[in-house]
């Protein structure tokens, strides 16, 4: 029975990432990621003093903070607005 619990724990930990591993996946510095954890802007787990991130949580965070691109017509409006300012 113990070995199945060990396998489950190993499986769960395989999806966990340290600060150093998670920051590049998000495209931010370790300092920024630490700030986000302090501000509770991103989900994390605390194992004693160690902070780990679940890969699925990071992907959900990226999806939740996605900003859709504007259509092609909107970029022309921006160019015209910039031209008008000159």
Image (cartoon, grey):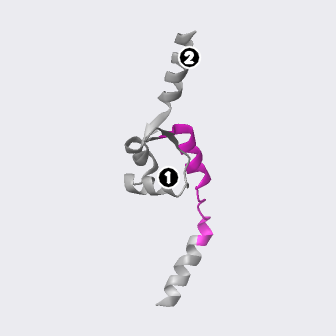
Circle 1 crowding by C-alpha within 10 Å: few under 14, some 14–19, many from 20: some
> Which residue of the protein is positioned furthest toward the top in this rendering?
1
Residue at the disc numbered 1: 37
Q: Residue at x 59, y 45 (%)?
A: 60
Q: Is residue 74 left or right of residue 35?
A: right
Q: Nearer the viewer, residue 3 or 73?
A: 3
Q: Nearer the viewer, residue 22 or 69?
A: 22
Instruction: Report how many numbered discs are placed on residues in the image.
Output: 2
* Mark 2 / mark 1, whichever is N-terminal: 2
The quadrant of the rendering that contains the N terminus is top right
Image coords of residue 42 (percent x, y)? 54, 51
Q: Residue at x 55, y 82 (%)?
A: 80
> Which residue of the protein is positioned furthest toward the front in this rendering?
48
Image coords of residue 15 (percent x, y)? 50, 32
Magenta-drawn segment = 52-74
Image coords of residue 37 (percent x, y)? 50, 52
Q: Nearer the viewer, residue 66 or 31?
A: 31
| Residue 22 versus residue 84 in the image, above or below | above
Residue at the disc numbered 2: 5
Does the magenta segment cover residue 13?
Answer: no
Q: Secondary structure at mark 2?
A: helix
| Residue 47 versus residue 12 in the image, above or below | below
């Amino acid at each position: 029975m113990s070995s199945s619990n060990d396998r489950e724990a190993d499986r769960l930990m395989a999806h966990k990432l340290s600060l150093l591993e998670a920051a590049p996946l998000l495209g931010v510095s370790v300092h920024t990621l630490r700030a986000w954890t302090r501000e509770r802007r991103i989900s994390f787990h605390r194992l004693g003093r160690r902070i780990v991130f679940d890969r699925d949580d990071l992907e959900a965070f990226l999806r939740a903070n996605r900003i859709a691109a504007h259509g092609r017509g909107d970029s022309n409006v921006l160019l015209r607005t910039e031209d008008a300012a000159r």
